Image (spheres, helix red, strand yellow):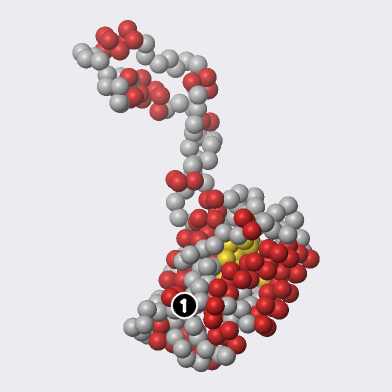
């Protein structure tokens, strides 16, 4: 990790002396500009100042300077649980619904079975002590995800102030012209995904995005960049309305070829602890050739 120093004058090399007023006067014909602190140094002093001990390069770079989160990460600052919301009303009737315009609609909420699935997930999180010592819950603002977050918070005794709604990075993957079609037809999308992470579903003109795996990868990477910058040493529960956000995220975290993201599929109400060094044994890929250290570009 790159580092940056912040130092008081007491930690500087004792042999280094900043120029006094007399020195400055003798080396310049006019007073230095008060707006430019470097004007207080002549060339020699400035070179000495920037070449002081490397031990001063020991403090972390501020969050704003860290840049975008890298996949796969060398380490994670927090502990993560990935949760797929329970079955939605649209899923109950077997219809694809990914248009973000309808994401907060009551019709996009949990079905009765979805509520039971989410309650089981919440109890599982409680049984393993996921929120002991508190945790943060990051759900998509999509109706079913936010309902799932409230159930998880209630069962685990998490204050509602620790539910942080996410407004775009966790939207369900937009499936374009597959919108409104049978859930079974999603296998056609996944067949394309296995060929290239850049293949998009055909577009549609009703406002539904048509997102490739690479598009989803960008969103979930941005999400991790925000969370990893905002928290350190915390437990974060990410609640997604669909499986694709979570499979693409986990594939990126563990360094799997994104074309194989569906191997990591989440059932409605499923939870999974994220370990960047491994994946669950029941989701292990058939071959190490699925490794990818530079997603989404995998060969």
Q: Nearer the viewer, residue 127 or 278?
A: 127
Note whether residue 251 is visible: no
Residue at the spot x=20%, y=13% of the render? 29
Residue 116: % across, % down: 71, 79
The residue under the point 49% across, 71% down is 171
Farthest-out residue, left: 29
Q: Is residue 244 left or right of residue 84?
A: left
x, y percentage for residue 246? Answer: 57, 71
Q: Nearer the viewer, residue 96 or 280?
A: 96
Q: Nearer the viewer, residue 130 or 77?
A: 130
Q: Is residue 62 above or below residue 289?
A: above
Q: Is residue 204 left or right of residue 280?
A: left
Q: Which quarter of the figure has residue 73? A: bottom right
Secondary structure at badge 1 equals helix
Vertical placement of 184 versus 223: above or below?
A: below
- In which quadrant of the rendered view does residue 43 lie? top left
Q: Is residue 279 above or below residue 38?
A: below
In this view, the residue farthest toward the front is: 106
Residue at 43% of width from left, 15% of height from top?
17
At a point 79% along the width and 66% down the height, the residue shown is 127
| Location of residue 275 with respect to 26 vertically, above or below | below
The residue that mark 1 highlights is: 102
Q: Exactly how many numbered labels are in the figure?
A: 1
Report x, y in % for residue 236: 63, 59
């Amino acid at each position: 990790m790159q580092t940056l120093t912040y130092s008081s004058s007491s930690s500087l090399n004792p042999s280094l002396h900043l120029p006094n007023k007399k020195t400055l006067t003798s080396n310049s014909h006019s007073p230095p500009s008060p707006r430019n602190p470097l004007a207080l140094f002549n060339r020699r002093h400035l070179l000495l100042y920037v070449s002081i001990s490397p031990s001063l390069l020991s403090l972390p770079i501020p969050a704003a300077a860290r840049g975008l989160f890298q996949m796969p990460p060398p380490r994670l600052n927090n502990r993560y649980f990935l949760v797929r919301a329970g079955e939605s009303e649209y899923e109950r009737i077997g219809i694809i619904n990914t248009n973000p315009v309808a994401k907060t609609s009551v019709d996009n909420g949990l079905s009765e079975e979805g509520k039971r699935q989410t309650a089981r997930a919440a109890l599982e999180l409680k049984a393993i002590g996921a929120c002991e010592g508190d945790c943060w819950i990051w759900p998509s603002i999509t109706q079913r995800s936010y309902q799932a977050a409230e159930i998880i918070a209630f069962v685990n005794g998490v204050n509602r102030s620790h539910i942080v709604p996410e407004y775009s990075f966790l939207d369900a993957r937009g499936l374009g012209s597959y919108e409104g079609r049978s859930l079974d037809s999603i296998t056609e999308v996944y067949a394309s995904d296995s060929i290239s992470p850049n293949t998009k579903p055909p577009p549609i003109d009703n406002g539904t995005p048509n997102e490739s795996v690479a598009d989803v990868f960008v969103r979930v990477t941005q999400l991790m960049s925000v969370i990893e910058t905002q928290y350190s040493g915390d437990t974060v529960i990410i609640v997604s309305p669909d499986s694709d956000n979570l499979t693409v995220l986990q594939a990126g975290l563990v360094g799997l070829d994104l074309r194989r993201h569906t191997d990591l599929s989440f059932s409605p109400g499923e939870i999974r602890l994220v370990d960047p060094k491994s994946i669950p044994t029941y989701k292990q890929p058939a071959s190490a050739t699925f490794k990818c250290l530079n997603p989404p570009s995998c060969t």
